[in-house]
Amino acid sequence: MTSDDQSQPPNAPQGIPATGSHPGWNPVTGMSGWNPQVGPPGWVAQPGYSPPRIPPHQQTRGLSPFGMPARHSWEIPLLVVVVVLTVLAYLFALLLLLTGSLDQYVLLFVFAPMLLWFGRGMTYATQRVNGVKMSPTQFPEGYRMVQEAAARFGMQTVPDAYVVLGNGQINAFASGHGFRRFVVVYSDLFEIGGAARQPEALAFIIGHEVGHIAAGHVSYWRQLGMFLGPFLPIIGNSLIRAQEYTADNHGYCNRHLGAPTAMQTLAGGKYLNTIVGFDEMADRAPQEKGFFVWIVNALSSHPVLTWRMWALRDRSRHGRLFLRPTPPPPAPYTGYPQTPPVGYSTTTTYFPQ
C-alpha cells in the first residue's frame, strides 16, 4: 500500500483523489461526511475554562487563604505617627546642629541616611559572600517556594534567597539594598539534602518573609522614616508587631496549612514541634492576663506566641496589638437533654420497699 492509497477513503475508486470525490473525508480520523472545521456529528462547542468555585466562607477582609493578603489595620496609622515623630526628630537634630549643640544623638540623626544605607549594604554583602544562594540546584525546594510566593503576591521581581548557618536557631528575615531585595533563611529549617523537615511550615515562613518585601517593609525610605522607632518603646514596637501580623497574613495566604506547624516550630524547635499543641497554646491567649503579660507584649518586636497563634486560628479579625484576645461567648444554656444518652439507664427506686 502506497501513501496515495492511505489518503483515499474505503471503497474509493483507485486513482481518484479523496478530496475530489469525498470532500468531507478526513485521512487522520478515517471518517467522512462531516467538515473537520466544524467537528464530527453530535459535536458541540465546549464551554470556556472557568476557575473552580470557591466554597462559601466568611468574608474576612483579606485574612482568609483566598484573594490577596490584608495589611494589619493598625499598621498605617502607627506608621504615620512614627514617621511624623521621626521627621520632627530630624528637624530638631538639624536645629541643634546649626546652633552648635552637638552630642551623639544629634550626630546619629544627622547621619542617619548614610548609616542606614551603609548598614543595609553591609547586610546584603554578607549574604552574597557567606550565604548559599538558593537555585534550582542548591536548596531547590526553598527556591521553588520563593518563586511561588512572589507569584502569589503579584511581585514583578523575584527576590534573591540565601541560606545561612543557623547553629540551632530557627529564624529568617528579609531586607534589601538599593533596588535589590532578598530573603535569608537559617539552615536549621532545612534537613540533609536541602529538603525541609516540615515543607508546609517552611512555605509559610518563606511566604511571611516575602510578604515583608511585598508589603514594602524593607524599603529604604520607609526604614529611614521609622528611624526613631527604636527610641519609642511602645509605639515603635507596636508598629513592628503590626508589620509582623501583616507578614503573617501573607504567609497564611501563601500556605495556610503550614501556619500551625510553623508556630509549633518557633515554640518547641524543629524536633519537638509535634509535641506542641497549637490549639492548646492558642487557647491560653485570653487566659494569660496581668500587668506584666501586657508589658511583655508591649515591649516585644514580635507578637507573643500565644496571641500570634490565636490570630492565625481566628481569621475573622486582625491580631491584637495591645489587649489580649477576647474568648468567644459561652454557648447559651438550653437545659439538660430531654432524653438520656444512648446506653444510659435511669433508676427510679433507690431503696427497696
Image (spheres, rainbow, N blue to C red):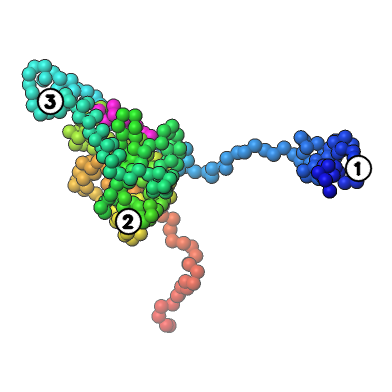
Identified at 43% across, 83% down, the residue is: 353
Q: Extreme top residue here?
A: 98
- Few, some or many residues within 10 Å of mark 2 (<14, 14–19, 20+): many
Sequence-first disc among 1 and 2: 1
Vertical side of 248 occupied by 198: above or below: below
Identified at 41% across, 33% down, the residue is: 157
Quadrant of the image occupied by residue 72: top left
From the viewer's perspective, tell me whether residue 126 is left or right of residue 314.
left
Q: x, y (%) of residue 6? A: 82, 45
Residue 14 is labelled as: 1
Q: Extreme bottom residue here?
A: 353
Mark 2 sits on what residue?
270
Vertical side of 49 occupied by 80: above or below: above
Identified at 22% across, 23% down, the residue is: 87
Q: Which portion, as a residue range, is magenta?
A: 214-224
Q: Extreme right residue here?
A: 13
Q: Secondary structure at mark 3?
A: helix
Distance Cα–Cα, label 3 vs label 2: 44 Å
Which dot, 1 or 2, sits closer to the camera?
1
Whether the residues at callouts 3 and 2 have beta carbons within 8 Å, the answer is no
Q: Secondary structure at mark 2?
A: helix
Q: Is residue 170 visible?
A: yes
Residue 106 is labelled as: 3
Quadrant of the image occupied by residue 318: top left
